[in-house]
Amino acid sequence: MLLKLGPLDAGRVADLRPYLDAVPDPRSRRGRWYPLTAILLVCAFAVLSGAKSIEELAEWGGRASSTVLSAIGIRRHPLKWRRSPSPATIGRVLGALDGDALDRAVGTYPADQHRTATEAATTGRRRVIAVDGKALKGSARLTSTRRHLLSAVTHGLVVTLAQAEVGAKTNETTRFRPLLAPLDLADAVVTFDALHSVKANISWLVQEKKAHYIAVIKTNQPTAHRQLAALPWRDIAVQHTASGSGHGRRESRSIKTCGIADELGGIAFPHARLAIRVHRRRKQTGKRETRESVYAVTSLDAHQTSPADLATAIRGHWGVENSSHHIRDVTFAEDASTVHTGTAPRAMAALRNLTIRVLKTLGADNIAKTTRAIRDHPERALPLLGITNNPDLYGT
């Protein structure tokens, strides 16, 4: 599996350490033995090897040779041995970290490292970015609700650009702007579900970030939904169709678009230029066929996009569930994880995002098989994050 990743030279894979150096150390200076960057590297390499829990993070360090630990930055004991941090040490550090700082470090690193690959994957097309939330089900306790994360993820080549935790007393819509504010979104298309179809956020996205949007409109926006449903869709020909089968079902989708004329009143939604109707037919084996119409609006004009591109973007938003969330839940058992202390659940999610992003961008077509190929050979993980077995090269 690792042969598919190709040569992992310095020009293709950047060193992760300078990015992790920017994460502030939450520990007091007294009694520190392990550098924070070294602990985070142990965690990152362990997740690259398929680790799912705090104990498995520490086990990866226990399997690593003294040479590998030296390259990571583990200090040598006066008695000449090197020892990886214990589960208790890793758990305390992850639970006390600045979650925003770690997400910035993890998000910025692949963005710089894999910019060429990302641009190659989107040549001639606008970047499309999905804003989507995910609950960490196993993090719930009797005294606290489960943690909830909001992420910005690119369509196609899966890249988590930003991630933020949604507070227990807030909701996803309040985190929409803080999540996207640091990102360069000029001329990109942002997709989101009906929950985020908040007019103030949409106006900010178009006016301040110079981005486009595709917003699904449901009954939580009653005026806009009623206006969209009342458009003369019967008189508009189908402009694009797509179909497929798998997992015991057949599905077909058709799309129609309609220009929104401002002089006729438009749609009660800011900067809307095209109305969209997607009609889905689904036939599950042994069940009756179901039909559903979904309405959306976009700030793109007809000359800036095509029905096929709009259909791909809308379908791609739903595909985030398979391309990112499914891998995190199935390969890394995220929903089954009982990590719950402090920022540890968010830190583990950030490391999973890093693993998926790095391996996908380097060409891995099966994350589970690739992590198994690394698991029993810790030295195989080092070049994936730009680290050689020569620790003297760092910082020179």
Image: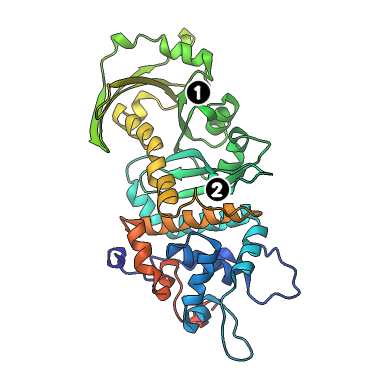
Q: Residues within 10 Å of mark 2 (few under 14, many from 20)?
A: some
Q: Secondary structure at mark 2?
A: helix
Few, some or many C-alpha atoms within 10 Å of disc 1 (few <14, some 14-19, many ≥20)?
many
Picture coordinates of residue 170 (x, y %)?
66, 35
Residue positioned 59% across, 73% down in the render: 85
Q: Is residue 10 visible?
A: no
Quadrant location, the C terminus: bottom right
Q: Which residue is under mark 2?
A: 138
Note whether 69 is above or below 12 in the view shown.
below
Q: Quadrant of residue 181?
A: top right
Nearest to the eye among marks 2 and 1: give it.
2
Where does the image place residue 48, in percent across and percent down from the top left? Answer: 44, 63
Q: Nearer the viewer, residue 363 or 339?
A: 339
Please, what is the three-letter code of the amino acid marked with disc 2? Gly
Question: Outermost residue, bottom direction?
Answer: 79
Q: CA distance from mark 2 to mark 1?
A: 40 Å
Q: Position of residue 380 (x, y in %)?
A: 39, 73
Residue 224 located left or right of residue 157: right
Q: Is residue 141 left or right of residue 237?
A: right
Looking at the picture, tell me which residue is in the foreground, 245 or 395: 245
Q: Nearer the viewer, residue 277 or 133?
A: 133
Amino acid type of the residue tagged 1 in the rendering: His
| Residue 4 on image: x %, y % | 28, 63
The residue under label 1 is 271
Residue positioned 59% across, 85% down in the render: 76
Q: Secondary structure at mark 1?
A: loop
